Amino acid sequence: MEVIADLHIHSRYARATSKNITLENLEKYARIKGIGLLGTGDFQHPEWNKELKKELREDEKGILWSKTGFPFIWQTEISLMYSQNGRRAVHVVILAPNGRIADEVKEYFESKGRTDYDGRPIFGMSCKQLVKELKEIDDKIEIFPAHAFTPWFGIYGSDSGFDSLYDAFGEQIKHIYAIESGMSADPEMIWRLKEKINIVSFSDSHSMWPWRLGREATIFEIPELSYENIIKAIRTGQGLKGTIETPPEYGKYHYDGHRNCDFSCSPEETKKLNGICPKCSKGLTIGVDYRIDKIAKEEKGYKQENWKPYHKLTPLHEMIAFHLQTTLLSSKRVWEIYDILIRHFKNEFNILLYVTEKELRDAIPEHKILIEMILANREGKLEIIPGYDGTYGKIKFGDRVMSMEKDDVDKPVKDDKNKQAKLF
């Protein structure tokens, strides 16, 4: 069976997340997106943990099921901040095989500090210590670095990361089987590091809206849905069919620059500028593209052995908003077209990956430019002006360039009693 999974999300108890995140809403929009498996997010948070146990039923294969038959697995993200040859700040995703082990992990974190103030708590321990002590609880606990190249909190981050996985994990690297690419990197960029690591991709979503949930995901091809099969795929690559990636240029840290100075540039230009912003004369925030060039062992175009294919896809809401020339993803006009497409084609991933040009023209004949964008997006030909220093990239199609409204965490979108809710 093929399963599209998003195993890195957050609850409403994490900072800067939508207060509308409920299990019901996560399931609803996951189905609309085309996701077949979600992480629970934040399982160590006491209030969210109670909710998970109340609303979900766990089977003998480590899968949690909603009352209407949608699957989750135990998942959280934590932040490690510590000193190791300088300041280090690394975010890590953790998966647990069942509720009993999730509770032991929860108790472990409670012994290290508070877990009730944020869905992604901060602990002053090293990557090595975390992996060693979690593996002492149970070897089936899965640990992988989150959004690997985010400058501030990625394992390879330009501000506080490491130059290699071994630098971060030492002898505990034997327990690290995968890394999460994150929005600012794709597999082809990571292959250049020659780390011999599997690559997964998940959204790190702070809301349940379909332009966030599943914006990055991993496609598994497994015999049946079980924690064991998911982890086997992550660890061995067998059953790891590929990933869905947001174009890395769309990420907030792809190019170098200064957001406050409205200035960005390529790594080549940064080198000419000696890393100094020409507007304020301060050091530029170095992005992922520059960072990869600095630590890469291979040139662009290198493919690692047993590489997996991947799709670079801009979310459908973004393209509809661009087509309508509105910067607001949650506008009524955007939702109207989105709903038409979902009614015709069941879910967003089906539209982005498989629906034919003829089928699209039959469904929305008056939106020819949008159809062209969907097809260009599928072929990796939708141009993106790179993001930088916390600013998302901009879509460019034809002569038009536009960035979308991103401050959408708790923006009301539609009444849940609308026609969309009746689709499932």
Image (tube, helix red, strand yellow):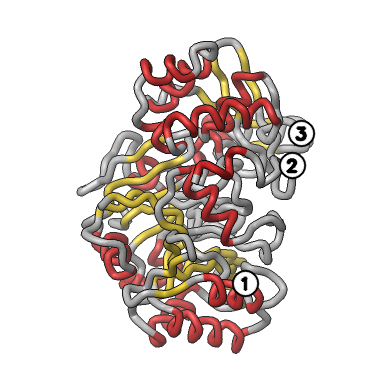
Q: Which mark is residue 282?
A: 2
**65 up-or-down from 104: above or below:** above
Residue at x 47%, y 46% (from the top left corner): 216
Q: Residue at x 70, y 41 (%)?
A: 413
Q: Nearer the viewer, residue 64 or 124?
A: 64
Q: Residue at x 57, y 82 (%)?
A: 109
Q: Is residue 276 above or below residue 133?
A: above
Q: Mark 1 or mark 2, which is nearer the start of the sequence? A: 1
Q: Is residue 299 visible?
A: yes
Q: Is residue 68 left or right of residue 230?
A: right
- The residue identified by callout 3 is 261
Relative to 344, residue 115 above or below: below
User: Residue 67 location, x and y as percent?
Assistant: 49, 65
Depth order, front residue of 266/360: 360
Residue that numbered label 1 is attached to: 48
- Tell me how far mark 3 sits from mark 1, CA to CA: 40 Å
First reached walking from the N terminus: tag 2 or tag 3? 3
Foreground label between 2 and 1: 1
Locate residue 166 relative to residue 261 in the image: left or right: left
Q: Quadrant of residue 152?
A: bottom right
What residue is shown at x 56% (from left), y 76% (from top)?
Answer: 54
- The picture places residue 272, in percent across and down from the top left corner, at 58, 30
Quick one: 82 or 358, which is closer to the camera? 358
Q: On the rendered structure, is 28 left or right of 357?
A: right
